Amino acid sequence: MIKLIDKVHLLIFMVLGILLYAQEKKQFPNVPVILQKINPNTKTDSWILVYKSYGKDNILRQSGAKQEYESQSSGFNIGIAEEDEFYYIVDFSSGKPEYITDLNALRKFVGKVDNIQDAAVFAATEGYIIDEEFRDLAANYYEDKSNYYLDLGKLTSKECPYQKKHFTLTIGKSAETISNVKDNGPYIELYNKKCTNNPRLLKIEKKKNQKMSLKNQKNLQNADNFYETERLILRPMNLEDAEFIFELYNSPKFIQYIGDRGIKTVTDAENYIKNRFLPQFEKLGYGNYLVMTKDGNHKIGGVGIFEREGLDVVDIGFSLLDKFEGKGYAYEAALKVKSIGMKDFGLKKDFSDYHQR
């Protein structure tokens, strides 16, 4: 009798464990990985997935023999894309190349929802997005025997300030429809340059009509400063870093996850620094900083506070050479530049132009 009870308890624990595992939330790693794992509607031995960034095609997946195709000037995205970047698919199943360049065509190409990636594509055709910047809220999922459950974002207001909400979608594995939508509320509000009520824009306009204050003079002086963390040294990028920028911006992971900046020579890198990095330092006092290790003074990456075109909010970004990843350097450097922005440049309000909830 005791052995029978023990077996029943064991069975219950196994069932509960399976259920808990099945409902464990997982994060979508990024848009390229999602698109690489979709299943075409019909069996096709030959198709390619292309990521185009700043005029350059990068083949992310190739099924079957490589064939000739024409580069496309437009495409689709199921996430949030930078300007001049998109995806498209070339399908050779009919004997000639057919180009999938919009979400409706992508939905037809995917067809039946065979996996969670197909479900994400299906949701994208309904206006939902994979927001990689807020994975915990708008880029994760779990599933059970009958349904996929996707936590995704959606731009719900184009009035100023713009607003995004995150939703939990229930997509049936057999019905292939969105059977339930749970509104989880807004998770980000932001202003862009077209918003006349943008507090940062109003602040900038006010500064234009004033003489340079002592604080602004201090900001310009800070543009030449070196900053230290426990293991790192940060200093403003300059033309002496052209060879390093050429190496960093042409590393495979930088091109895959950030984009191809079209830097094909060291001279291109010099021009990029001259036209992109230096003007922001001259204008604001802060920008893109070189990251070096204290131990050996190795140049390992870049981290900075950036003004993104199209959005009038400041943003922290970083990139490292592959061999220096996984050591906590990026997190350490990002914390430092945030501190620089807030303490040296008074960006506390500017960072809060968007609100994470």
Image (spheres, grey):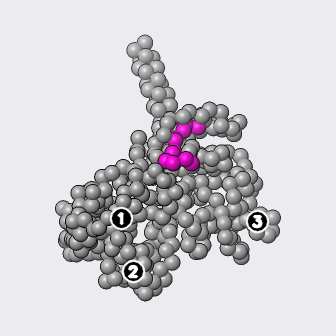
Is residue 66 shown left or right of residue 97? left
What range of the chain is rendered magenta? Answer: 158-169
Marks 3/1: CA–CA distance? 55 Å
Q: How crowded is mark 2: few (under 14 residues within 10 Å), some or many (20 or more)?
A: some
What is the magenta segment's predominant secondary structure? strand
Amino acid type at mark 2: Lys
Instruction: Look at the numbered discs 2 and 3 and tell me whether their residues touch, using CB distance below 8 Å.
Output: no
Q: Which of the two discs, 1 and 2, sits closer to the camera?
A: 1
Q: Which residue is drawn at 37% across and 83% down?
A: 243
Residue picked out by circle 3 = 98
Measured from the top left, where is residue 47 in percent x and y? Answer: 69, 65
Residue picked out by circle 2 = 274
Count the marks: 3
Residue picked out by circle 1 = 209
In this view, 100 is above or below 24: below
The local secondary structure at tag 3 comes to: strand
Decide whether residue 152 is among the magenta residues. Answer: no
Q: Residue at x 45, y 68 (%)?
A: 253
Which of 343/202 is in front? 202
The local secondary structure at tag 2 comes to: helix
Q: In which quarter of the image is residue 322?
A: bottom left
Q: Which residue is drawn at 51% across and 41% down?
A: 166
Q: Residue at x 42, y 85 (%)?
A: 266
Amino acid type at mark 3: Glu
In this view, 8 is above or below 172: above
Sequence-first disc among 2 and 3 = 3
